[in-house]
Image (cartoon, grey):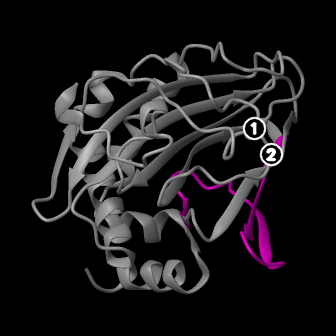
Amino acid sequence: MKGTASAAFERLSHKGYAFVPAAEAAATLKVGVGELGALRASWSRLPRDGYLRDGGRYRSRRHSCFVLDPGACTLLPVAHRAHWQPTSYNALHGGIERWFEAIEASVTGSQVWAQLLTSIGLLFGRVRSVERWYIEAHQFRIDTEGGIGRPTPEGAHRDGVDFVALILVERCGVRGGETRVFEADGPNGVRFTMSEPWSMLLMDDARVVHETTPIQPDAGSGFRDTLVLTYRAGGFLAPESRETGQSDDPSRH
């Protein structure tokens, strides 16, 4: 992987994060923006998130899991499973198993989906070599039908994984939504607003914390659609592995 891939890799390695504009992302990951655009309609069919502990109804989402073998470039889905985080990483929603509906098969079965997840995993593998990536994929829609929508109601946080890819799918009729990335152990950080569809933010989860500020309607109700992909080498986060840190092998499911 050369050229644009090297540029993104160098920024991620040096700073712990890399913002990648859409054209650079497409070239880096060898995916077509038009092909990615064909997936966009599925964000309009996301069910409401029934687990929001702040009482809001501004978030809709789906969730699915995969395992990537970087050496063989093989991406495999695993049986549908709950999303779980410890309270040390998510004080608001941690400690509970959240069962979201799976991402539609028309999305996860597409060639561009496999290319996207595999290419991002290979890029992360240049920073940290692993035998397997355990990937959790989250489709989010944050809307302003009720007034204010909160992309990260838990505040500035880490996800408890190795790497995170935050991809903007669409942004329509909203103000706000500033993304903030700060050193986990230092004072430095950046703030910017993602506005270009299929631009992405790549993060080393051990080195930075991140959040996105609330969105407000610009004219009528609006929404902000994102795809969040997390990559972890030690297995999927789950209650049974909370203390041992052992891998939760997908072959058991």
Q: Residue at x 32, y 53 (%)?
A: 116
Q: Position of residue 101 (x, y in %)?
A: 45, 16
**Left or right of 25 in this view: 47:** right
Q: In what element is the residue under mark 1? A: loop
Q: Nearer the viewer, residue 30 or 247?
A: 247
Looking at numbered disc 1 in the image, what kind of residue is underneath it? Ala
Please indicate, yes or no, whether residue 27 appears anywhere in the rendered image.
no
Q: Nearer the viewer, residue 207 or 36?
A: 207
Disc 1: CA contacts within 10 A as few (<14), some (14-19) or many (>=20)? few
Report the label total.
2
Determine contact: label 1, label 2, CB under 8 Å.
yes
- Give the vertical position of 176 relative to 142 (above or below): below
Dividing the image into 4 quarters, which one contains the N terminus? bottom left
Q: Nearer the viewer, residue 199 or 150?
A: 150
**Mark sitting earlier along the chain (1/2):** 1
Disc 2: CA contacts within 10 A as few (<14), some (14-19) or many (>=20)? some
Q: Residue at x 29, y 61 (%)?
A: 119
Dividing the image into 4 quarters, which one contains the C terminus? top left
- Give the vertical position of 124 relative to 87 (above or below): below
Q: Position of residue 222 (x, y in %)?
A: 76, 29
Image disc number at residue 91: 1
Return the residue at label 2. 155
> Residue 72, located in which quarter of the rendered image?
bottom left
Range shown magenta: 175-203
Q: State the residue lying farthest toward the left.
A: 72
The mark closer to the camera, 1 or 2, is 1
Image disc number at residue 112: none
Q: State the residue lying farthest toward the front.
A: 244
Looking at numbered disc 2 in the image, what kind of residue is underneath it? Gly
> Within the magenta stretch, is there residue 54?
no
Q: Residue at x 71, y 52 (%)?
A: 157
